[in-house]
């Protein structure tokens, strides 16, 4: 496969995943704003920080009001990480890789773009926001569904999946890193609870609230939340799950192209060195330091994939 096509599939998947992640972050912030208006500005600030656009927002605005933050994250053309901007980039990359996609996948991406840009043509009213965010999640789920249901399990499919799981791992690590100050105070008192609204925000941001309840019941602790989102391999947005999938996709590509790559070696190293230690040792070594190390390793892996498969020629 041409490097340009491989790169387009990789980034199409990354931008789609990022748009859904940002929609979930907005939903979490909106819940906080409705129930805890006193702390809403700080929560919106942390959400902008998670999305990596806090400085860009403050360059244009002087306060963290809900309406301004939501509009900035949804549709502001000055924000390259707004959902409208991300969807445009995803569609442009899908067009570039059109011959490597099934008709169903292309139509799903194109329909998603037309549907959501229509919904976001005007500033979204507060009453309409839950439905708009649900539509973003639903459209992304449809793209993933047709990708899984119609694509050959060839190199194109694996490049798209790599983009998805690299982006997903980055998002989960960022959420935990932004929220680590909530988790750390409980380390000395394992088993004590942290603020219900705040920890539910963490779990809802990665679609993990109900799954956590199934596994741990009503028990809430810093250690268990971190363990679930970092090391639990059956949780599809945990760092361990994403890393396993990236390693699987890279292994397939190495077999298909008949050569071992540096990216493949890096993925194995991340899985071995970052995701094999028990959660207590991660906390003992510093959760923030651990997460920053993972984010750096994940970003370096993405860059190495681009080099190994010549995305830019």
Image (cartoon, rainbow, N blue to C red):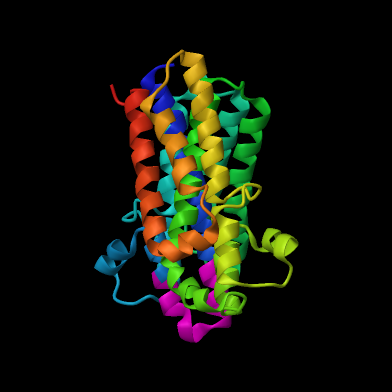
Instruction: Let me know if residue 32 is in the magenta part.
Output: yes
* Residue at the outermost top position: 258
Instruction: Let me know if residue 184 is in the magenta part.
Output: no
Please provide percent x and percent y for residue 171: 47, 53
Q: Nearer the viewer, residue 269 or 152?
A: 269
Identify whether 90 is placed above or below 46: above
Residue drawn 34% across the image and 40% down it:
300
Whether residue 84 appears in this view of the structure is yes
Q: Nearer the viewer, residue 226 or 60?
A: 226
Number of numbered callouts drawn? 0
Magenta residues (range): 28-45
Residue 27 sits in quarter = bottom right
Residue 191 sits in quarter = bottom right
Please provide percent x and percent y for residue 3: 37, 21
Please provide percent x and percent y for residue 185: 47, 78
Q: Is residue 224 left or right of residue 74?
A: right
- The dominant secondary structure in magenta is helix
Whether residue 117 appears in this view of the structure is no
Identify whether 95 is placed above or below 240: above
Location of the C terminus by quadrant is top left
Please provide percent x and percent y for residue 13: 49, 37
* Residue at the outermost bottom position: 38
Q: Nearer the viewer, residue 108 or 288?
A: 288
* Residue at the outermost left position: 59
Residue drawn 55% across the image and 26% down it:
157
Location of the N terminus by quadrant is top left
């Amino acid at each position: 496969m041409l490097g340009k096509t491989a790169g387009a599939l990789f980034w199409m998947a990354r931008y789609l995943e990022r748009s859904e992640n940002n929609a979930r972050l907005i939903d979490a912030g909106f819940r906080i704003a409705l129930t805890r208006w006193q702390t809403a500005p700080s929560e919106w600030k942390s959400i902008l920080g998670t999305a990596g656009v806090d400085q860009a927002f403050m360059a244009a605005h002087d306060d963290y009001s809900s309406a301004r933050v939501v509009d900035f994250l949804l549709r502001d053309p000055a924000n390259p990480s707004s959902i409208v901007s991300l969807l445009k980039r995803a569609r442009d990359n899908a067009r570039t890789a059109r011959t490597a996609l099934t008709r169903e996948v292309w139509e799903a991406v194109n329909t998603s773009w037309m549907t959501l840009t229509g919904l976001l043509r005007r500033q979204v009213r507060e009453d309409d926001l839950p439905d708009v965010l649900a539509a973003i999640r639903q459209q992304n789920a449809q793209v993933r569904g047709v990708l899984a249901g119609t694509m050959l399990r060839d190199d194109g499919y694996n490049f798209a999946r790599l983009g998805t799981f690299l982006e997903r791992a980055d998002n989960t690590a960022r959420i935990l890193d932004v929220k680590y100050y909530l988790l750390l105070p409980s380390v000395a008192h394992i088993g004590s609870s942290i603020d219900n609204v705040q920890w539910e925000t963490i779990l809802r941001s990665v679609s993990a609230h109900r799954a956590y309840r199934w596994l741990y019941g009503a028990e809430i602790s810093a250690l268990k939340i971190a363990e679930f989102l970092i090391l639990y391999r059956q949780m599809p947005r945990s760092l361990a799950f994403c890393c396993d999938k990236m390693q699987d996709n890279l292994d397939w590509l190495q077999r298909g192209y008949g050569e071992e790559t540096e990216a493949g070696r890096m993925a194995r190293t991340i899985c071995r060195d970052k995701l094999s230690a028990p959660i207590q040792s991660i906390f003992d070594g510093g959760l923030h330091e651990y997460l920053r190390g993972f984010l750096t390793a994940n970003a370096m892996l993405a860059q190495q994939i681009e080099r190994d498969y010549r995305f830019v020629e």
